[in-house]
Image (cartoon, rainbow, N blue to C red):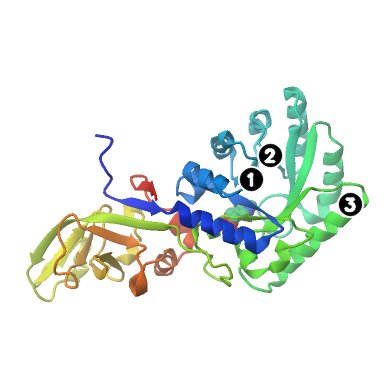
């Protein structure tokens, strides 16, 4: 039973993924690349993605929280929590050898105490809030905390990092100011004999819009969405990365319905004439945006088939007027395809009035992840 192929699947090209990784690595060299694999590699399946990236040369991984960190440790690469750690999470993370963020003085002290109890040296990166307003030590308060943390036993401050809220906006003043603050803190720390082996601030937005964030004193970037060949909604798309994913399903029914037939919940579409319509086995539970209703299309045998009516949880109805030879069981491309009708994550994001991150992270649980 469990071997039954699923009706909806994501095809994820590991070859494209590793090509994307290499393009990013070449573009930012000599900076290193930390692959951001939080939220199950943005929903695409963390282990196959991490293994492929490790084979391509990725030297370290970033995640959001402890469970994600533990999943990746068996790969033998450094794993770093990029956001926050709760007090009770610290000791198990130190014992496991996960690199932790120092987001405040108390966290530094807890990491040091946990490391003493475990009889190990914990590795940590100081997290600065230079303008993100989410987590980390405020830039103006950073120096004394860094000095205290650097003096704590069994705590090695390997790195220092910060994050951008605005780096999609080429030339944005805030982004430049954040880097100025970061550099000033580096200099002040250096004057007190504190040096960080890893210094990083760039995310995908910055890699595409702020070359300054990818050169000295910075020596590492953190990228997530670009690995998957997608970009933020706004900003330049300097990197030539390609989409890694296609979302596919199958045609489950074909019927010719008479004029006047209302289609789906609310009858938001009514047939003007007798029409050959197809029922497709994917709906919003699989990640198709409700906004495709009466507005988008899916591809069958390479032809665009307009979505008729409101799509539902498990099904969408399409017109088959452009594919007279369509048959039950045919593959239906919901995202992907080639040529002028190719459907991209960015197209769906625009349709849904959201950003590509939400599209990639929103494929449903029953969608099989197939790595090709
Ligand atoms: C701290 C941090 N760094 C880097 C990234 C990677 O961002 P992106 O996927 O835009 O490259 C994220 C993701 O939101 C993040 O939270």
**How dense is the environment of label 3, judged by Cα within 10 Å: few (below 14), some, or many (20 and up)?**
few
SS of the residue under disc 3: helix
SS of the residue under disc 1: strand
Q: Which mark is residue 60?
A: 1
Q: Position of residue 86 (x, y in %)?
A: 64, 37
Classify residue 60 by image quadrant: top right
Query: Residue, x 24% and y 65% (percent of image)?
Result: 301
In the rendered view, would you say 194 is above or below 72? below
Q: Alpha carbon of mark 2 to alpha carbon of mark 1: how far?
A: 10 Å
SS of the residue under disc 2: loop
**Contact, mark 2 vs mark 1 (Cβ under 8 Å):** yes
In the rendered view, would you say 116 is above or below 353? above
Query: Residue, x 44% and y 67% (percent of image)?
Result: 346
**How dense is the environment of label 2, judged by Cα within 10 Å: few (below 14), some, or many (20 and up)?**
many
Residue 252 seen by the camera: yes
Toward the viewer: 297 or 312? 297
Q: Is the residue at mark 1 in contact range of ligand 1, meaning its CB lies under 8 Å from it?
A: no
Residue 105 seen by the camera: no
Q: Which mark is residue 99?
A: 2
The numbered mark, 3 or 2, whose residue comes first in the sequence reads 2
**Contact, mark 3 vs mark 2 (Cβ under 8 Å):** no
The residue where tag 3 is placed is: 190
């Amino acid at each position: 039973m469990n071997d039954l192929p699923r009706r909806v699947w994501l095809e994820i090209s590991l070859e494209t993924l590793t090509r994307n990784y290499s393009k990013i690595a070449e573009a930012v060299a000599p900076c290193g690349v930390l692959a951001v694999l939080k939220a199950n590699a943005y929903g695409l399946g963390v282990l196959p993605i991490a293994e492929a990236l490790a084979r391509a040369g990725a030297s370290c991984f970033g995640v959001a929280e402890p469970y994600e960190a533990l999943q990746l440790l068996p790969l033998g690469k450094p794993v770093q929590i990029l956001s926050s750690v709760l007090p009770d999470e610290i000791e198990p993370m130190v014992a496991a050898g996960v690199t932790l963020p120092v987001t405040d003085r108390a966290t530094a002290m807890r990491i040091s105490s946990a490391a003493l109890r475990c009889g190990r040296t914990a590795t940590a990166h100081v997290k600065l809030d230079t303008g993100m307003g989410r987590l980390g030590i405020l830039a103006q308060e950073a120096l004394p905390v860094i000095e205290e943390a650097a003096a704590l036993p069994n705590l090695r401050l390997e790195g220092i990092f910060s994050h951008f809220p605005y780096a999609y906006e080429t030339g944005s003043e805030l982004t430049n100011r954040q880097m100025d603050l970061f550099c000033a803190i580096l200099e002040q720390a250096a004057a007190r004999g504190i040096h960080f082996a890893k210094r990083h601030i760039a995310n995908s937005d910055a890699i595409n819009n702020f070359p300054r964030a990818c050169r000295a004193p910075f020596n590492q970037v953190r990228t997530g969405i670009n690995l998957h060949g997608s970009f933020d909604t706004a900003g330049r798309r300097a990197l030539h990365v390609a989409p890694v994913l296609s979302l596919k399903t199958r045609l489950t029914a074909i019927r010719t319905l008479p004029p006047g037939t209302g289609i789906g919940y609310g009858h938001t579409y009514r047939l003007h004439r007798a029409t050959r319509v197809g029922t497709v086995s994917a709906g919003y539970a699989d990640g198709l945006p409700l906004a495709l209703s009466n507005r988008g299309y899916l591809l069958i045998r390479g032809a665009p088939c307009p979505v008729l009516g409101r799509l539902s949880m498990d099904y969408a109805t399409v017109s088959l007027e452009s594919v007279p030879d369509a048959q039950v069981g045919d593959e239906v491309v919901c995202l992907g395809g080639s040529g002028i009708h190719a459907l991209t994550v960015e197209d769906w994001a625009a349709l849904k009035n959201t950003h590509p991150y939400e599209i990639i992270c929103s494929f449903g649980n029953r969608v099989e992840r197939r790595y090709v």
